Amino acid sequence: MSALVAIFAMFIISALGMIVLIWFWLRQRAQREPKPVRPKKAKRRKAAEAAAEPEPEADGLPQKTGRSRLISAATLAEAEAALALPAADYAAPEEPAQPEPEAATPAQPSPIALAARQAIVLRQHFPPHRAPQARSWLGGSPVLPGAAEWPVNPATGKPLHFLFQLDLSEVPPEASLGLLPPEGALALFLDLDWGPGETFRVIHAQGYAGTPWHALDVPPGLAMAYGDEAALAWPWALTPAHGTQILPRWPITPRLIALTESEGPGWPHNAATARALLDAQGQNDLAPALAIADFHGADGQAFEPCWYGYPQDWIAVQIAAAALVHEADRASRTALHDPYPGLDETERAAQLKAVREEAQAWFDHALGNPALAPIAPAVRKAFWDWLATHRALAERVIPAAVEAAIETTLHASPEEAAKFPEEVTARVAYRHALARRTPDGVIAPPPARLLAQASGDADLAATHLLLLELPDNPAIGHHFGGGALQWWITPEDLADRRFEAVVMTRAGG
């Protein structure tokens, strides 16, 4: 046993000795190898920069020399598959799309240019009506919203005459050019006594849904329309005292029409305009005007009333009698178209004098009766028999006198006018039409209108809008010397509702 211990001890001592020898040999070898010389820092940096080779450009994913434990097997498989694919062609990154410059917005036509392509025409209702919902008319007396008052001439203090009112809600929106007020009423007053400066007043009576409209009472100081010229303006008048303060009332409706380009300034007189007015009228075929042939009997020789009910009222007698007086006076001043060619000068003068005195008597008698009171059949026959005794003069005036009598009753008393035969009423419809078709073509004179071309070559047309033009129209009592009255306003003043800036001009006449 002791021998085994001794052997094991010797083995341990030998192994330890062997280890010590190996350590000593390795230490001696390490001491014999030269130590590397460490260069200065600056020189080492310069040498490193000079020896540095350019780094290769990355090609796809970075090359891996081993597998990291932080990457999954699936991700590593995808990366390695990507490295195995052929390199894709290089494509420069796309420049961000630059927005295209916006096209320049075309300049919008000015309101003045737009107004030259349209017209808001005032279509008269025929026969006239008194519908309670109607709020647009020519003549009569005003009914306006809000607190509107009857204006006066500031120079004289006298009330102005009422010409026109328009319910602005009736104007087609596309016709207003974005400038005309959409609600309320536009009203026009004018000094028809032809006083200083021909004073006028344009009123915008503001009104909205629910705003009450009220009638303006006729001022007691309102003068006779047309003053000393009233006897020439009204068919029933012989002196200014027989005139009227109020013009005939005719209801209207605004209608929009399109106009074609005009070759020159002013209202376009062409076939397209005539057709547009005819369409706006809505009635192609109108009865012709009364003619003397309508007062000849079935044999073409007798002198008879055109319908059994004439004269229908005392105003009809007054109109015919006044026409005979005027005609007798005219014939006495000139020998042209002598109604009594077979008489010598003395006999002719005596005949004209007798006619005039008798006509004056009938006029005075009619003036003493209610104008619209019906006439008994016996009186109607007596009056016509008297006309027949003066046929030479009567035939010259009777068509126009009967026409005026029908028209006067139509606007003054629609109730009485409703008793007329339709064919009788129809004979004066042409006087209130925008256009009418005739065998010679369509007749369409320039109408009453707003926001349109003006009549004539107006100096203001380059800077102002035609707010309103009213042409001469005896059928509704508009006597403007054969021309037209025009009211102008700038687009800016219209947009700002500055109707006090409106100016008036005349055209033609």
Image (spheres, rainbow, N blue to C red):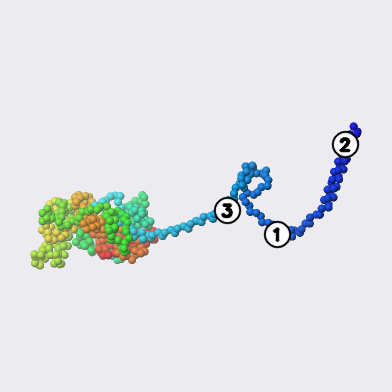
Front-lying residue, 319 or 214: 319
Residue at image coords 11%, 55% = 300
Q: Amino acid at mark 1?
A: Ala
- Report the quarter where the N terminus lies: top right
Residue 431 spot, x, y in % from top left: 23, 57
Mark toward the start of the polypeptide (2 vs 3): 2
Binning the other alpha carbons within 10 Å of mark 1 as few (below 14), some (14 to 19) or many (20 upward) gives few
From the viewer's perspective, is 431 left or right of 10? left
- The quadrant of the image that shows the C terminus is bottom left
Most foreground residue, 120 or 132: 120
Q: Which residue occupies 37% across, 59% down?
A: 111
Amino acid carrying label 2: it is Phe
Q: Which residue is mark 3?
A: 90
Q: Which residue is mark 2?
A: 8
Q: Position of residue 123 (x, y in %)?
A: 28, 55
**Of marks 1 and 2, which one's residue comes earlier in the chain?**
2
The amino acid pointed to by label 3 is: Tyr
On screen, residue 183 versus residue 384, left or right, reads: right
Asked whether the viewer can see residue 458, the reply is yes
Q: Is label 3 in a helix, a strand or a loop?
A: loop
Question: Measured from the top left, where is residue 195 in percent x and y?
Answer: 28, 65
Q: Residue at x 8, y 67 (%)?
A: 344
Q: Which mark is residue 314?
A: none
Left or right: 137, with 326 as reference point = right
Question: From mark 1 to mark 3, how far is it between C-alphas?
Answer: 31 Å
How far apart in space, not on screen, are marks 1 and 2 (Cα)?
64 Å
The mark found on residue 50 in the picture is 1
